[in-house]
Image: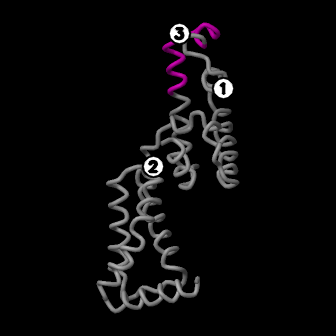
Amino acid sequence: METNVYRNDQLLVQRLNASDTSALSDIYNAYWQPLFLSSYNLLKSKELSEDIIQDVFLDLWNKRESLIINISLKAYLYACTRYKVYEYFRKNKNKLRVDLLDDLNKRLTESTPLTKLMHKELVQHIENVVATLPEKCRLVYTLSREQKLSHKEIADQLNISPKTVENHITKALKTLKLSLGSFLSLEFIFWLYQQHH
């Protein structure tokens, strides 16, 4: 069975190499839907996913004459799709919302060993960044995020105004967000987006 699929893939690629447009149609019809779904699962946007899949097939056609595929066609197309989605996230990294990081533990129910490892690294990273914050800022952030106290409760406890509490939290989140830009792997960003939707 595997051999037949591989042979069929090789024939499709050879037809593509020869600029056979019907080969592109055959590949499109066979793989469009699963590729779209894999993209949609990450992006949660029909239009964006359609654009990405269109780009994948456009690239396939543009590279047709020099195309050599040593893995299954399906695996190759999935890799191309994943790369396009990576690119989208990389270019839009600055739009990553800090609220994706809230209640991280709750979203770990369907995690894999890889996401568990990434989660552990992320928690460690956040702890390291929080440790570098000025003392009062660190204390406010810890009371807010870890002990889940309201701004008013923190203000009362530390004898400062709720506005000052808000300023400390804003500063802490800004510091975290800046540090996360360079830290977060694209896979982890994917995972956060998937869990959040």
Q: Position of residue 132 (x, y in %)?
A: 65, 34
Q: CA distance from mark 3 to mark 2?
A: 34 Å
Residue at which label 3 appears:
161
Q: In this orientation, which residue lies closer to the viewer: 38 or 104?
A: 38
Give the label, 2 or 1, closer to the camera: 1
Residue 162: say if magenta. Answer: yes
Specify the amino acid type for callout 3: Ser
Mark 2 residue crowding within 10 angstroms, few (<14) / some (14–19) / many (20+): some
Residue at which label 1 appears:
146
Specify the amino acid type for callout 1: Glu
Residue at which label 2 appears:
93
Quarter of the image where one finds residue 195: top right
Q: CA distance from mark 2 to mark 1?
A: 26 Å
Vertically, is 128 above or below 86?
A: above
Specify the amino acid type for callout 2: Lys
Q: Position of residue 169 (x, y in %)?
A: 54, 24
